[in-house]
Amino acid sequence: MLEMSGIRKVYRTDLVETHALEGLSLTVDDGEFVSVMGPSGSGKTTFLNIAGLLDVFDGGTYRLDGKDVSRLSDGEMSGIRNRNVGFIFQSFNLIPDLDVFDNVDVPLRYRGLPAAERKRRIEKAVGMIGLTSRLHHLPSQLSGGQQQRVAIARVLAAEPKLILADEPTGNLDSLMAREIMDLLDEINRQGTTIVMVTHSPECAARASREIHLLDGKVVDVERPPAIAEAR
Amino acid sequence: MLSYNTKIAIKSLRRHPLLAAVIIAGIALGIWASTTFTTVRHMFARDPLPGRSERLYFIRMDNWDPARPYESNGASGLKIPPQLTYRDSMELIRSSIPVRQTAAFISNVVVFPDRRVSRPFASPARLCFSDFFPMFEVPFHYGHGWDKRADANAEQVAVIDDATNQKLFGGANSVGKHIRLGDRDFTIVGVLAPWRPFIRMYDMFGNFTAEPEPIYIPFNLTPKMQLRSFGNTDGWKSAGSTYEDFLASEVDFIQFWVELRTPADVAAYHRFLDDYVRQQKKSGRFQRPLLNDVRSLRDMITEYGIVRPQLTAMAVMSVLFLVICSMNLTGLLLGKFLARAPEVSVRRALGARRIDIFMQHVIECELVGIAGGVIGMLLSIGTLRFIGKLIANSVHFSLDLEMIGAAVFLSLIAGLLAGVYPAWRVCTVQPAVQLKG
């Protein structure tokens, strides 16, 4: 699904150059659930932005779903983000003016799906996260956990091959965090590849593989014992 | 995506109604000024008789003083009197080259209505030939103009305007009824529909925004009724003491119009005039160098400076004012759009292309432009009515379809001018920077 080799990313200002990724190499197979951990500044978010084609890189090669994405136009990258990649953010990133229905609708609109198909997908996705009764509520009328579930519904409706989650439980209490992780587990069981950046060892332990980053490089890859035994 | 982007734009405008109102008011102000002044210019510049003004020609001949040329007041600087003498008019009217032709001048008559209706009153009257009415597309409510026989026989027939018909006959069909003008009874053959051409194109030498005359009678009644001109009269030589002397004099007071279909007809008519003047020279008239002018109505409007340079300057300034209004709004829109960078980043992450984001914001600008345009146009309609009263009472300045189209176009341009840079800036926002946190 995701093959990165020698990825480098440098942030430049007038005064200083910051090497966020220095030769990062990583492969994630189809259907895997991978967690990415590391201290602040280790390059986790930069890795996720590059993986989701939200940012460009300065060196190395990156193949996403078998396609070299090193030199794509804005339109091509947007198309891949829309069809193949789903994002779940720590701060939910729902659009405050739009109700649940319209928030879930956003990626489907940019895909140009017909109205009936969009409606079917939205109702199904919102049903899966158990918020059908809140379909026409604004984000401000929902709890944090509910907002994150709506963000997950937005991903589910788009049916991507890869989900990139950036600390999806970071703003939630432990009970809600568990609910969200259960949902991600369920989505992964249905075959969707998930790459999740997290600071939480408990959440990381739910993944089939943990990757540790330090100073922009992969320093360690481990399979949690329970998962390893089960597989 | 258009309906989706429009829906998002409306939501965005509702989110900050005060800011939206300020931006809309800015564009409305610019549209108000530009629409008002460009409309005033347009009203003067537009063709008074579309499809016909290129076929109507005004005739001039230089019968002026051999010792000094006529002092021109036209933009062309052509030193030629604008009107003709009675005797020349009566000769020219014999030509068979024009499909229609009329000599005309304005006089004054005393109307003696039924005593129960009104006291006698003086009224301007136009003496003209029957072709005058179709040539200048004069609209009739009842009846029609008189015929060629009435021209030839100088019959006592009259056409009255709607206001006179209201005053004398209560607005009823007065065709066939009689009206006493001076010491003669006239049979009414036609009643005009309300008619207020923006410029009095058949007589532009005095107040060209004046109203048309209330009464029209055959030109050939001139000698019988011994009528004199109440309009502009030019002369360089004594007109004599008797009325007959006046008609035979070199006094210019008659406007002469012909309708010519083809350039060949125009050339033929010009030759006809030249031949006529050469003939007259033999009898001692027209002692200045040969100078005859056959000029279309359209060109006459240009020559007589109906569209004053000040009007053009005001129109240009008002459009520049709109541009300045729009540019000033750029800052407000930039702030508004950049405040939305996090939402834009989410949309980009979910698959929106840069062009999608750009179009979303341009549509918002265009909605603002259209809203401002509508308000500006409404303000402009009110102002135009006021200006109409200032310039000439009863002249009706209004937005025609052409100007409404222009105002809508200007509104869209204003919206685009104000918003294209902010829309471009927001679509180049780096989503990765905004989404963390």
Image (tube, rainbow, N blue to C red):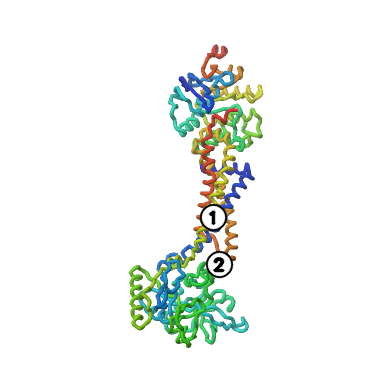
Q: Residues within 10 Å of mark 2 (few under 14, many from 20)?
A: some
> In which quadrant is the C terminus of chain B drawn?
top right
Q: Is residue B360 visible?
A: no
Q: Which mark is residue B89?
A: none
What residue do we see at 57% from left, 64% from top?
Answer: B388
> Pointer 1 indicates a residue of which chain?
B
Mark 1 or mark 2, which is nearer to you? 1
**On screen, residue B147 above or below B46:** below
Quadrant housing residue A73: top left
Q: Secondary structure at mark 2?
A: loop
Measured Cα–Cα span from mark 1 to mark 2: 22 Å
Label 2 sits on what residue type? Val
Q: Position of residue A39 (x, y in %)?
A: 58, 18
Label 1 sits on what residue type? Ser
Disc 2: which residue: B395
Q: Secondary structure at mark 1?
A: helix
Residue A96 left/right relative to B297? right
Q: Are marks 1 and 2 on the same chain?
A: yes
Q: Nearer the viewer, residue B344 or B202?
A: B202
Going by the picture, which residue comes out furthest to the front?
Answer: B67
> Pointer 2 indicates a residue of which chain?
B
Tell which circle, 1 or 2, labels the residue nearer the N-terminal end: 1
Q: Nearer the viewer, residue A159 or B266?
A: B266
**On screen, residue A118 above or below B137:** above
Disc 1: which residue: B318
Q: Position of residue B71 (x, y in %)?
A: 45, 72
Q: Is residue B258 visible?
A: yes
Q: Position of residue B3 (x, y in %)?
A: 53, 43
Q: Position of residue B207 (x, y in %)?
A: 52, 71
Q: Nearer the viewer, residue B82 or B166?
A: B82
